[in-house]
Amino acid sequence: MRILITNDDGINAPGIKALVEVASKYGEVKVFAPDRERSGSSRAITLYKCLRARKVENRFTNAEAYEVNGTPADCVVVGLNVGWPDGCDLLLSGFNNGPNIGFHITSSGTVGAAIEATLSHIKSVALSMGVFASSAPAHFETGKKWLDDNWDKIMNTKFPEQTLLNVNIPAISSEEILGTKITQSGKRVYANKMLERLDPWNEPYYWYGSVVEMDPHEEGTDIDTISKGYVSVTPIQIGVMDDGMFEDFKHLE
């Protein structure tokens, strides 16, 4: 099995090392990851500067690795051209240090990389650890155990056309995990807030921030599921028209 791995936390993030440790047991792994953190980059691609892939030695055991000066989606494209020019069987993106749930998936670089690979007809899984506080432990060992335990199930599942899996694992010990549930995406996770500050020349600048807002009434969603101690697995389908809305917009013809 040929496996491509990337993330949006950067090639030196502990989460991607944990992911490689699991995946390398099941096939040949090649890593193409950003040279620095690229969180929030969604499926952005680089158009107006050259991309470079620099081989990194001794970063991972049993995996060829490259750092790319681009986004996670760039890493997928470069990885398929440089690492797997004949294609690969699986794309894994993660383990992200923080959840990718609710509306947040639309801006997630972790999910964006999985979307890019899915559009190239590659089975793709985005994996994130549900860490909500910067000082809290990520429990990557829990993520590793879940993926190891569920590897065969995922590999033996035929994904529908243009569909990926978005997996969120509670950042708790493996013994505390209550199980796995198939979920829908919640409607809201973050309330966006732009912070204004003054630079040394007394000129204003702006820093993008956010406040976590999880709706406890969204039962059965990814938000609800990981907050209760279950692993959330959300199938995401790309670019499919909602037939139920067709008539709602028919008047625009």
Image (cartoon, rainbow, N blue to C red):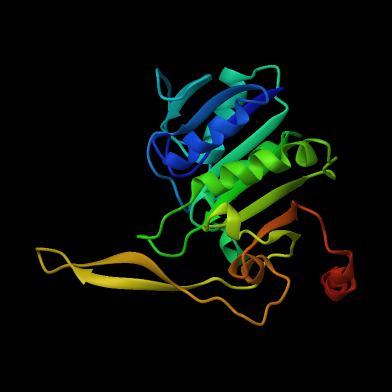
Tell me the residue at 53%/35% (across/down): 74
Tell me the residue at 65%/27% (across/down): 3
Quarter of the image for residue 19 reads: top right
Could you say where residue 187 lies in the image, as x and y percent from the top left? 65, 73
Tell me the residue at 70%/17% (across/down): 86
Instruction: Give the answer, above or below, for where 81 lies relative to 169.
Output: above
Camera-side residue of 148 and 59: 148
Camera-side residue of 121 and 177: 177
Could you say where residue 40 lies in the image, as x and y percent from the top left? 48, 54
Number of numbered discs on residues:
0
**Residue located farthest toward the front when viewing the structure as drawn:** 175
**Left or right: residue 200 compared with residue 91:** left
**Residue located farthest toward the bottom when viewing the structure as drawn:** 217
Quarter of the image for residue 94 reads: top right
**Left or right: residue 253 compared with residue 223:** right
Q: Quadrant of the C terminus?
A: bottom right
Camera-side residue of 3 and 246: 3
Instruction: Give the answer, above or below, for where 96 lies relative to 24.
Output: below
Q: Quadrant of the N terminus?
A: top right
Could you say where residue 73 lies in the image, as x and y percent from the top left? 56, 39
Q: Is residue 159 visible?
A: yes
Could you say where residue 216 lies in the image, as x and y percent from the top left? 61, 80
**Left or right: residue 225 compared with residue 6:** right
Q: Is residue 46 visible?
A: no
